[in-house]
Image: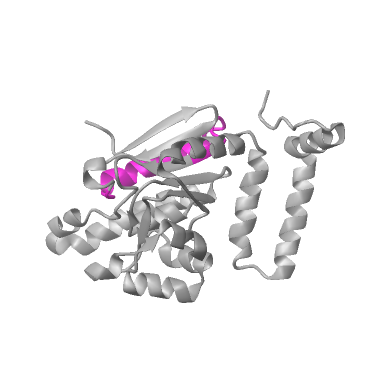
Protein backbone atom coordinates (compact mmCIF):
# COMPACT_ATOMS: atom_id res chain seq x y z
CA UNK A 1 0.00 0.00 0.00
CA UNK A 2 1.41 3.36 -1.01
CA UNK A 3 2.02 5.93 1.68
CA UNK A 4 -0.08 9.11 1.35
CA UNK A 5 3.08 11.23 1.67
CA UNK A 6 6.41 10.34 0.08
CA UNK A 7 9.79 11.85 0.87
CA UNK A 8 13.10 12.02 -0.93
CA UNK A 9 16.34 13.42 0.50
CA UNK A 10 19.06 14.36 -1.95
CA UNK A 11 21.98 16.74 -1.46
CA UNK A 12 20.44 18.43 1.55
CA UNK A 13 17.01 18.92 -0.06
CA UNK A 14 14.05 17.01 1.36
CA UNK A 15 11.15 16.82 -1.07
CA UNK A 16 7.81 16.06 0.59
CA UNK A 17 5.15 14.95 -1.89
CA UNK A 18 1.45 14.71 -1.10
CA UNK A 19 0.81 11.37 -2.74
CA UNK A 20 -2.88 10.56 -3.14
CA UNK A 21 -3.10 11.54 -6.81
CA UNK A 22 -6.29 9.61 -7.52
CA UNK A 23 -8.03 11.61 -4.77
CA UNK A 24 -6.48 14.94 -5.74
CA UNK A 25 -4.17 14.64 -2.71
CA UNK A 26 -7.18 15.21 -0.48
CA UNK A 27 -6.24 15.37 3.18
CA UNK A 28 -7.49 12.49 5.29
CA UNK A 29 -6.15 11.44 8.67
CA UNK A 30 -3.52 9.15 7.16
CA UNK A 31 -2.15 11.95 4.99
CA UNK A 32 -2.20 14.46 7.85
CA UNK A 33 -0.32 12.02 10.10
CA UNK A 34 2.19 11.25 7.37
CA UNK A 35 2.72 14.93 6.67
CA UNK A 36 3.36 15.56 10.35
CA UNK A 37 5.87 12.68 10.44
CA UNK A 38 7.67 14.06 7.38
CA UNK A 39 7.68 17.59 8.76
CA UNK A 40 9.13 16.44 12.09
CA UNK A 41 11.82 14.46 10.30
CA UNK A 42 12.69 17.48 8.16
CA UNK A 43 12.88 19.78 11.16
CA UNK A 44 15.06 17.48 13.25
CA UNK A 45 17.46 16.10 10.64
CA UNK A 46 20.61 18.25 10.31
CA UNK A 47 21.20 16.74 6.88
CA UNK A 48 18.09 18.56 5.64
CA UNK A 49 18.95 22.11 4.62
CA UNK A 50 15.88 22.97 2.54
CA UNK A 51 12.38 21.47 2.29
CA UNK A 52 10.27 21.33 -0.87
CA UNK A 53 6.53 20.60 -0.64
CA UNK A 54 4.62 19.51 -3.73
CA UNK A 55 1.87 17.16 -4.86
CA UNK A 56 1.63 14.09 -7.10
CA UNK A 57 -0.66 13.90 -10.10
CA UNK A 58 -2.65 16.72 -11.67
CA UNK A 59 -3.62 18.49 -8.44
CA UNK A 60 -1.45 20.10 -5.80
CA UNK A 61 -4.09 19.46 -3.14
CA UNK A 62 -7.89 19.77 -3.22
CA UNK A 63 -8.11 20.27 0.55
CA UNK A 64 -9.86 18.05 3.05
CA UNK A 65 -11.32 14.70 2.04
CA UNK A 66 -14.96 15.76 1.89
CA UNK A 67 -16.07 12.16 1.33
CA UNK A 68 -14.58 11.32 4.71
CA UNK A 69 -16.47 14.20 6.29
CA UNK A 70 -19.74 12.81 4.95
CA UNK A 71 -18.91 9.25 5.97
CA UNK A 72 -18.36 10.39 9.56
CA UNK A 73 -22.09 11.15 9.82
CA UNK A 74 -23.08 12.47 13.24
CA UNK A 75 -19.46 12.15 14.35
CA UNK A 76 -18.35 14.69 11.73
CA UNK A 77 -17.63 17.51 14.24
CA UNK A 78 -15.27 15.35 16.29
CA UNK A 79 -13.80 13.76 13.16
CA UNK A 80 -13.03 17.09 11.51
CA UNK A 81 -11.66 18.57 14.74
CA UNK A 82 -9.21 15.68 15.08
CA UNK A 83 -8.21 15.97 11.43
CA UNK A 84 -7.71 19.73 11.63
CA UNK A 85 -5.68 19.40 14.81
CA UNK A 86 -3.37 16.85 13.19
CA UNK A 87 -2.94 18.98 10.07
CA UNK A 88 -2.25 22.01 12.23
CA UNK A 89 0.51 20.16 14.06
CA UNK A 90 2.20 19.63 10.70
CA UNK A 91 1.67 23.27 9.68
CA UNK A 92 3.25 24.48 12.93
CA UNK A 93 6.30 22.24 12.47
CA UNK A 94 6.79 23.39 8.87
CA UNK A 95 6.38 27.03 9.90
CA UNK A 96 8.72 26.78 12.87
CA UNK A 97 11.57 24.69 11.48
CA UNK A 98 14.95 26.36 11.10
CA UNK A 99 15.25 25.77 7.37
CA UNK A 100 13.50 27.29 4.34
CA UNK A 101 10.33 25.86 2.80
CA UNK A 102 9.65 26.02 -0.94
CA UNK A 103 6.24 25.04 -2.30
CA UNK A 104 5.88 23.95 -5.92
CA UNK A 105 2.28 24.28 -7.02
CA UNK A 106 1.76 22.58 -10.35
CA UNK A 107 -2.03 22.38 -10.32
CA UNK A 108 -5.17 23.37 -8.43
CA UNK A 109 -4.90 24.17 -4.72
CA UNK A 110 -8.15 24.47 -2.79
CA UNK A 111 -9.16 24.69 0.85
CA UNK A 112 -6.36 23.43 3.07
CA UNK A 113 -4.40 22.88 -0.14
CA UNK A 114 -4.41 26.65 -0.58
CA UNK A 115 -3.19 26.97 3.01
CA UNK A 116 -0.32 24.55 2.42
CA UNK A 117 0.63 26.10 -0.91
CA UNK A 118 0.82 29.60 0.55
CA UNK A 119 2.84 28.44 3.56
CA UNK A 120 6.11 28.35 1.63
CA UNK A 121 8.77 30.98 2.15
CA UNK A 122 8.95 30.93 -1.64
CA UNK A 123 5.97 29.74 -3.66
CA UNK A 124 6.46 28.80 -7.29
CA UNK A 125 3.34 28.08 -9.33
CA UNK A 126 2.94 26.76 -12.84
CA UNK A 127 0.59 28.39 -15.30
CA UNK A 128 -1.79 25.46 -14.69
CA UNK A 129 -2.15 26.26 -10.99
CA UNK A 130 -5.10 28.08 -9.51
CA UNK A 131 -6.16 28.80 -5.96
CA UNK A 132 -9.56 28.70 -4.25
CA UNK A 133 -10.51 29.03 -0.59
CA UNK A 134 -13.55 26.79 -1.24
CA UNK A 135 -14.63 26.32 2.39
CA UNK A 136 -17.81 28.39 2.44
CA UNK A 137 -18.96 26.76 -0.80
CA UNK A 138 -19.77 23.69 1.32
CA UNK A 139 -20.82 25.58 4.42
CA UNK A 140 -17.52 25.24 6.27
CA UNK A 141 -14.85 27.62 7.57
CA UNK A 142 -11.10 27.73 6.86
CA UNK A 143 -8.38 25.70 8.50
CA UNK A 144 -4.70 25.12 7.86
CA UNK A 145 -3.94 28.67 8.99
CA UNK A 146 -5.58 30.37 6.02
CA UNK A 147 -7.30 33.08 8.08
CA UNK A 148 -3.94 33.91 9.71
CA UNK A 149 -1.72 33.70 6.64
CA UNK A 150 -3.83 35.04 3.80
CA UNK A 151 -4.51 38.53 5.25
CA UNK A 152 -0.79 38.87 5.95
CA UNK A 153 0.04 38.00 2.36
CA UNK A 154 -2.67 39.75 0.36
CA UNK A 155 -4.25 42.18 2.84
CA UNK A 156 -7.48 41.93 4.79
CA UNK A 157 -9.77 43.25 2.07
CA UNK A 158 -8.57 40.78 -0.57
CA UNK A 159 -8.62 37.92 1.95
CA UNK A 160 -12.23 38.70 2.84
CA UNK A 161 -13.28 38.53 -0.79
CA UNK A 162 -11.36 35.36 -1.54
CA UNK A 163 -12.68 33.46 1.47
CA UNK A 164 -16.27 34.74 1.38
CA UNK A 165 -16.84 34.45 -2.38
CA UNK A 166 -14.45 31.57 -3.21
CA UNK A 167 -13.20 33.49 -6.22
CA UNK A 168 -10.68 31.41 -8.10
CA UNK A 169 -7.26 32.99 -8.42
CA UNK A 170 -5.14 32.22 -11.45
CA UNK A 171 -1.44 31.81 -10.81
CA UNK A 172 -0.77 35.24 -12.32
CA UNK A 173 -3.43 36.87 -10.11
CA UNK A 174 -1.97 35.12 -7.08
CA UNK A 175 1.41 36.70 -7.87
CA UNK A 176 -0.16 40.13 -8.24
CA UNK A 177 -1.87 39.81 -4.86
CA UNK A 178 1.20 38.42 -3.11
CA UNK A 179 0.05 34.86 -2.39
CA UNK A 180 2.59 33.39 -4.83
CA UNK A 181 6.19 34.41 -5.47
CA UNK A 182 6.26 33.88 -9.22
CA UNK A 183 4.80 31.89 -12.09
CA UNK A 184 6.97 29.37 -13.94
CA UNK A 185 6.07 27.58 -17.20
CA UNK A 186 4.63 24.17 -16.38
CA UNK A 187 7.41 22.25 -18.12
CA UNK A 188 10.05 24.22 -16.19
CA UNK A 189 8.56 24.14 -12.69
CA UNK A 190 10.35 21.04 -11.42
CA UNK A 191 13.73 22.17 -12.73
CA UNK A 192 13.31 25.68 -11.37
CA UNK A 193 12.25 24.25 -8.03
CA UNK A 194 15.40 22.11 -7.91
CA UNK A 195 17.59 25.07 -8.83
CA UNK A 196 16.05 27.27 -6.15
CA UNK A 197 16.17 24.55 -3.50
CA UNK A 198 19.82 23.87 -4.31
CA UNK A 199 20.61 27.56 -3.93
CA UNK A 200 18.92 27.64 -0.53
CA UNK A 201 20.52 24.37 0.57
CA UNK A 202 23.94 25.88 -0.16
CA UNK A 203 23.08 28.94 1.93
CA UNK A 204 23.38 29.77 5.64
CA UNK A 205 20.71 27.48 7.05
CA UNK A 206 20.89 28.81 10.60
CA UNK A 207 20.55 32.39 9.36
CA UNK A 208 17.60 31.37 7.20
CA UNK A 209 15.92 29.84 10.23
CA UNK A 210 16.41 33.04 12.21
CA UNK A 211 15.04 35.10 9.33
CA UNK A 212 11.93 32.90 9.29
CA UNK A 213 11.44 33.48 13.01
CA UNK A 214 12.00 37.24 12.79
CA UNK A 215 9.55 37.62 9.92
CA UNK A 216 6.87 35.64 11.77
CA UNK A 217 7.37 37.43 15.07
CA UNK A 218 7.58 40.81 13.40
CA UNK A 219 3.93 40.62 12.37
CA UNK A 220 2.85 41.12 15.98
CA UNK A 221 5.81 42.92 17.55
CA UNK A 222 6.30 46.59 18.22
CA UNK A 223 9.08 48.31 16.27
CA UNK A 224 11.15 48.66 19.44
CA UNK A 225 10.80 44.97 20.30
CA UNK A 226 11.58 43.92 16.75
CA UNK A 227 14.70 46.09 16.69
CA UNK A 228 15.83 44.41 19.90
CA UNK A 229 15.19 40.99 18.36
CA UNK A 230 17.13 41.93 15.24
CA UNK A 231 20.09 43.22 17.26
CA UNK A 232 20.21 40.03 19.31
CA UNK A 233 19.92 37.87 16.20
CA UNK A 234 22.60 39.59 14.14
CA UNK A 235 25.04 39.60 17.04
CA UNK A 236 24.47 35.88 17.57
CA UNK A 237 24.90 35.24 13.85
CA UNK A 238 28.16 37.16 13.82
CA UNK A 239 29.58 34.82 16.44
CA UNK A 240 28.43 31.67 14.68
CA UNK A 241 30.17 29.58 12.07
CA UNK A 242 28.04 30.92 9.24
CA UNK A 243 28.66 34.53 10.12
CA UNK A 244 32.39 34.02 10.49
CA UNK A 245 32.56 32.17 7.17
CA UNK A 246 30.44 34.76 5.38
CA UNK A 247 32.57 37.68 6.56
CA UNK A 248 35.83 35.86 5.78
CA UNK A 249 34.58 34.97 2.29
CA UNK A 250 33.50 38.55 1.64
CA UNK A 251 36.91 39.93 2.62
CA UNK A 252 38.70 37.26 0.59
CA UNK A 253 36.45 37.92 -2.40
CA UNK A 254 35.41 34.29 -2.69
CA UNK A 255 32.10 32.44 -2.50
CA UNK A 256 31.22 31.41 1.07
CA UNK A 257 31.06 27.71 1.92
CA UNK A 258 28.18 27.43 4.36
CA UNK A 259 27.73 23.66 4.17
CA UNK A 260 29.55 21.72 6.89
CA UNK A 261 32.75 20.11 5.64
Residue 147 percent coordinates (x, y): 43, 67
Q: Is residue 196 magenta?
A: no
Res. 43 visible in picture: no
Look at 58% across and 59% down and name the residue there: 216
Residue 156 percent coordinates (x, y): 49, 74
Classify 143 as above or below 157. above
Look at 41% across and 53% down and name the residue there: 116
Classify 260 as above or below 172. above
User: Which one is in front, 235 or 2?
Assistant: 2
Residue 174 percent coordinates (x, y): 45, 61
Q: Main secondary structure of the magenta part?
A: helix
Residue 1, quarter of picture: top left
**Number of numbered discs visible in the structure rendering:** 0
- Looking at the image, residue 48 sits to the left or right of residue 113; the answer is right
Q: Which quarter shows the C terminus?
A: top right
Look at 69% across and 32% down and name the residue there: 258
Residue 54, quarter of picture: top left
Res. 54 visible in picture: yes
Q: Which residues are magenta?
A: 26-51
User: Which one is in front, 112 or 82?
Assistant: 112
Amino acid sequence: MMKPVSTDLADGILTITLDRPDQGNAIDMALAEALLEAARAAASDPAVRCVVLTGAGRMFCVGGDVGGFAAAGDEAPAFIKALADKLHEAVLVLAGMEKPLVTLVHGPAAGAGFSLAAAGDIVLASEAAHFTAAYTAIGLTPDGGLTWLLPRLVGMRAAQELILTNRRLTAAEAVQLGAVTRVVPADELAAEGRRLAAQLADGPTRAFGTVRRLLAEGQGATLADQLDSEAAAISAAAGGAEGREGVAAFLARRAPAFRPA
